[in-house]
Amino acid sequence: MDYFNYRGGELFAEEVPTSTIAERFGTPAYVYSRAALEQHYREYSEALAERDHLICYAVKANSNLAVLDVLARMGAGFDIVSAGELERVLRAGGDPGKVVFSGVGKQEWEMRRALEAGVRCFNVESETELDRLDTVAGELGVQAPVSLRVNPDVDAGTHPYISTGLKENKFGIDITEALAVYARAATLPNLVVKGVDCHIGSQLTSVSPFLDALDRVLELVDALSENDIHIEHLDMGGGLGVTYDDEEPPRPADYVRALDERIGDRKLELILEPGRSIAANAGIMLTRVELLKCTEHRNFAIVDAAMNDLIRPALYSAWQAIVPVQPHEGAEEKVWDLVGPVCETGDFLGKDRTMTLCPGDLLAVRSAGAYGFVMSSNYNTRNRPPELMVDGEQVHIVRRRETIEDQLAPENCLPE
Ligand SMILES: Cc1ncc(COP(=O)(O)O)c(C=O)c1O
Ligand SMILES: N[C@@H](CCCC[NH3+])C(=O)O
C-alpha cells in the first residue's frame, strides 16, 4: 500500500496535499509517513510471528528520532553502527536490550558505552576487535555478548558500493576461518558467544544470494555445535530491496518463508536488520523548480534540492522516481536533466526524465525515506532541509530546517 497517492490531480501524503506541506514548511523538505513506516514494520513482524525473532531496524537508514520512536513503540529492536546511533535509540525510548551493535571500527569508548547501556549483542567483525572488546569488558567487570559477523563470500548482485559479503570487502570474518575464531572467542574470559551474524549487501532484489549465504552460515552453525559451541541466534542482517523503478523484490513474507525452510528445526532465534525496506518508501523529498535552462544539447531544470540534500543519484547513479505534485494535463513534454545548484557536474537528482515542467513547479522525489536525510551535508554551505512526519491529517516538524546561524554558531567558527 502506498501512502503517497494522487487524489484530485495532486500528490497527497496520507491525508495531506503535498503542496500544502511545501507552502507551510518550504522546500526542499523530507516528508515521512507514519502509517507507511508502521505498515512496513508490520509486514516483518507478521511474517516472523510464528518463530522466535527480533527485528532490529537499521538506524543508519533513517535515524530521525520520530522515526525511531514510531518503531520503538511497535516493539522494534535496533541495529546500530556507532555510539551516536545508540544515543538516538535511547533518546527515542528504544530498549537497549534489543540493540545489536555492528560495524568494523568500534572504538573503545563506544564499546564501553554500549556495555554500560546493556546492548543485546556486539556483531564482531575481526579478531582484533574481539580482543579489544574482551579487554574493555574486563575493565568494566562484565561479560560482553558477541556474535561473529562472517563474510560468506557471496555475490549479492547489487551495486558494488553497497555489496558487503564478498571476500574483497572489508566486512566480517572470512567464513573459512570462522570456526577457529569462534574457538578462540570461547576461551576469552570476558566474552559470551551468543550468535552468528552476516549481512551481504543492500538493495537485494532476489532471495537467492540470501539463501546462498544462509546455507554457508548454517553449515558453520552445525560445525560449531559439533565442537560444543552452541549458537542461540542467527542474525541475517538487512538488505531486502525496494521498488525504486520496476524492481520486484521479494516481500518480507516470502523472504522469511524461504529462510525458515532452510533453518528447519534448528533452535535458533532469527534476527533481521532491515533498514531500506522499512524506511525508503515511507518518505519523499519535496523540491521546487527554480529555473529552466534549455541549451542546444540538454534541457536543465534547476531545482532547489541538490546532492547535499540527497546524494544517492550522484554517489551510486541511483535512480529514484521524480514526479510532479500537480501534473500539467496534456501539456507538451520534454526530456529534462533535474539538477541542483551545487557546483559539481555530478549534482543531479535525475537525468533524461520526460515530463512537463514550468518554473515554480513542485516535484516529489520518491523512495527518499532511507539513505536520504542521513547522508545529507552542508556542502556549498547549504542548510540541511527539514524533516516532517505526516500522521493522518497532521504534519509534525521532526527536525527543523537548518539556518545559516546554526552553521555559524560560535563554537564552529574562529579560533580564540
Ligand atoms: C550490518 C548492516 N545491517 C543492516 C543494514 C541495513 O541494510 P538495508 O538498509 O539494505 O536493509 C546494513 C546496511 O547495508 C548493514 O551494513
Ligand atoms: N547508502 C546506501 C546503502 C548503504 C547500506 C549500508 N551498509 C544507499 O543509499 O543505497
Image (spheres, helix red, strand yellow):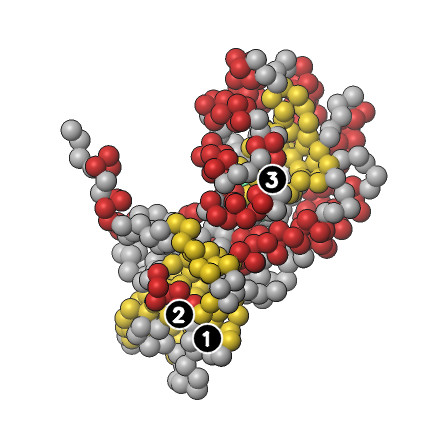
Q: Position of residue 266 (x, y in %)?
A: 81, 36
Furthest-bottom residue in view? 330
With 258 as the anchor, is 329 left or right in this view? left
Q: Is mark 3 within 8 Å of ligand 1?
A: no
Q: Earlier in the sequence, mark 2 or mark 3?
A: 2
Q: Is residue 158 visible?
A: no
Residue placed at 50% from the left, 22% from the top?
A: 112
Distance (Cα) linking label 1 and label 3: 36 Å
Q: Which mark is residue 10?
A: 1
Disc 3 marks which residue?
77
Location of mark 2 (residue) = 19
Coordinates of residue 409 in the picture (x, y in percent):
23, 40
Is label 2's Cβ within 8 Å of ligand 2? no
* Residue ID at (35%, 54%): 385
Residue 124: give x, y in percent of width and height.
58, 28
Quadrant placement of the C terminus: top left
Number of other residues with Cα within 10 Å of mark 1, as a class: few under 14, some 14 to 19, many 20 or more: some
